[in-house]
Image (cartoon, grey):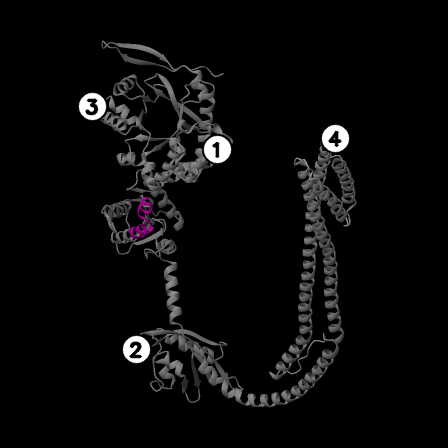
Amino acid sequence: MRTRIIASLALLFALFASGSVLALLTFGSATGLYEHVLKLHQIEDLRRTLLAAVFKVQTELLIPVTANHAELPAILGDAKRLDTIIGQCTNCHHTPTIATRLEDLRQGIHDYQSRLGFYLNDAGNDAGSDRLKHDAVLIGNTLLSEIEAMSSSASAHLRKLSVQAEAETRHGKLLLASAFLLTCLAGVLVALHLIRSITQPVKDIVAATRVIADGRLGYALPGVYEAEFGELVRAFNSMSLSLKTDQDKLMQEMAERRQVETALRKSEDRYALAEKGANDGLWDWDFASGRIYFSPRWKAMLGFADQWLGSMNADWFALVHAEDIAMLRGRLAAHISGETEHFTAEHRMQHKEGGYRWVLTRGIAIRDANGKAIRMAGSQTDITDRKQAEQRLFHDAFHDILTDLPNRALFVNRLQHTFNAAPRHNTATFAVLFLDLDRFKFVNDSFGHAAGDQLLRAFAGRLAESLRPGDTVARFGGDEFAILLEQVCDASEAVRIADRVLKAMRQPFRIGQHELFVSVSVGIALASPQHNEPDQLLRDADLALYQAKANGKARHEVFDAGMRTRTIDQMHLEADLRCALEHGELRVYYQPIFDLDNDSISGFEALLRWHHPERGVVSPEKFIPIAEECGLIGRIGEWVLLEACSKLSHYTARKDFGPELTMNVNISVKQLTPLLIEQVSAALRATGVAPQRLGLEITESVILSEGGVAESLLQDLRRLGVGLHIDDFGTGYSSLSYLHRFSMDTLKIDKSFVSAAVKSKENLEIVRAIMGLAKILNMEVIAEGVETQQQMTLLRELGCRYVQGYLISRPAEMPEILDTHCTFALGLKTGAGQVVQAEHSLACASAA
């Protein structure tokens, strides 16, 4: 430790001494520079004096000399002073350059004095003295210039030396301060190290003594200390080990004594501790006396005070539920006789306040050397909460949480029991009805899921009220319900019940502040010998429900074998449709939209066609619903969009039609998702088609069914810039409100109105009203299904600009439209009322 302290002090001294020496050297250099600066100041003063003297002589020479030459002695005196001044200046130490210039200056002064002497000696000669005076003045001016130049050079040198001297002074101060700070920092570090070297071992030893004072004898310090502290630690560890050894001997003796005492008390305390600590009630039955000990907890769980219950087995059995007593006695007898290893029974016990509590009773018999039971002890646990929870779980597992109706599992279970009880190979004795709320999704979207849940509960209650007492109604999930009708004679009875349900649903449902009218579709399937299991009957009821919805909803349908055949055919058609999409069997046909004002094609409607390799051309009305159900409509719709936009871009570039040619594409209800916006944007980007040249045709039923979702998506499409057309206008409901709400661009009058307009005045007025409405709303009108010249003429007279139909062209692939001359007759009325029949050709340039 002493060596470490001495070495630390020596290091501090050496560090400070090094810094001080460097600072002193720097200060010495600065001192020399300052001395040189002082000398230069003296030289500068002498130069100023010399400059003043020369200037004075020059001034005196320029003063005109009087007749008696009184000024000449003064000029001679001033000239002699120049020698003295220059002599003082050359006595100083200078650089070689300055010394050379001073010597040149001295020589110039001597020449000056010589000229002055000649001038003064010849002062009486006016002509000669003027020339000598002029020469002296010239030499004097030269001296003044030399002195001023030397003064500027000396001043610059003076400034440079001053800057160097100041820099050396600052450097010296910095070195001195740095040496001091480094010495102080090193001193602090050395002090901290020395303090830690001393205090840490002391702290460790103090802490170790406290550990031993706390009873941890045998604690040893690590042997990491040196010198004096190392010896102290070794002595401490030896002492600690000695104390530990003595303590271990003492503790061993005490442990042996405690074991003897514990063994004596353990058997006495075990039973008492178990009785107090357990939440269960304890009982102990002595077979010899017939008496039973019931713990306070055993009595308390049944509401009895300690003195209110007897101690005989009859007192116990008197509290057991009558339905459980036989089971309890039987299990007790089986265990006492040795048939079971343990006794366990779940049963009900009567509570003092009335009612029963479920308990779990367990026990084990104590037997003598011969194996005979002489005593039996056990516990009793209150399991009422667990039993109630089990009952709730069982109920919830087989009931719908929202409506509390049986769920699918319980319904199928009851249906299976009905199957098992029904006679085989006889006429139907029961039936299953599948029900589905129409437009339930619209209610959810419009009023929220809370309103939808209220509607389901109200519907379930009204449904249960419409059935017979023995019938089962269940909720399968969502808005799907099922009814099991037992004891039905024939289909007519099931139909009557279905009619009763439909009638009950015609009344409005009061949900919050709203009155909602909802209908229900019902599928009916009667059990038959062909039904071997519940799933088959449920499947047929589901098929009948599907048929009811397909036939217009709010009705019922009874299953027949043809439905299954049609379903299987539909499944095959779905598989074929998937293959058609992969193998390119789908094609896009185009039907022209004719502009009556310009007698030209203004656009096309893209129509999907399927050329099945075996079935031939499959109608869109048949495969589009399948595509919607199986989820293929998204891929198909995206392909049609891209194909139609590609054709539009291609034929516009070829200039086969006008530059404002448009393309209309039909949109399915299943396509109204945010993905549609991406698909339309992608098709426009890929083909370069301007958004305003693409029109999307949407039926009224799509808008009506989708509600708020449709409104949001249509607004996004409008912001995209594409046109929005209502297809088949007039065939749906709420058309006027949706026209105002969705701001559509074009109305397409359904062909049913077009064909009827030429048959009756009433239908004609309907078409006229539609066109008037469109004009007011600043919408275009396209008349669909124009098939006769009479319809064409009528529409022209009504002011309908755009028409579409077989009269112009059937839907075909684009090359066929280009290669075929579509000729039709146009009746044009002249001013005199005569009708001229003109042949108009829609022939476009043939494909290049």
Asked if residue 314 is positioned above or below residue 445 in the image, the reply reads below
Q: How many marks?
A: 4
Which tag is nearer the camera, tag 4 or tag 2? Answer: 4
Please state the horizontal and vertical placement of residue 413, each as a whole percent of the image.
Answer: 38, 56
Which tag is nearer the camera, tag 3 or tag 1? Answer: 3
Residue 508 shown in magenta = no
State the CA–CA distance, disc 4 to disc 3: 148 Å
Asked if residue 94 is positioned above or below residue 788 in the image, the reply reads below
Tell me: 45 left or right of 369: right
Residues rendered magenta in the picture: 442-455
Q: Which residue is mark 3?
A: 761
Q: Which residue is mark 4?
A: 128
Which tag is nearer the camera, tag 3 or tag 2? Answer: 3
Q: Which residue is mark 2?
A: 353
Q: Are marks 4 and 1 in contact (CB under 8 Å)?
A: no
Question: Closer to the camera, 676 or 261?
Answer: 676
Tell me: 531 left or right of 580: left
Q: Are marks 3 and 2 in contact (CB under 8 Å)?
A: no
| Amino acid type for the residue under numbered disc 3 | Lys
> Which residue does the image show at 73% across and 45% down from the upper left?
81
**For the residue labelled by badge 2, is the local secondary structure a helix, a strand or a loop?**
loop
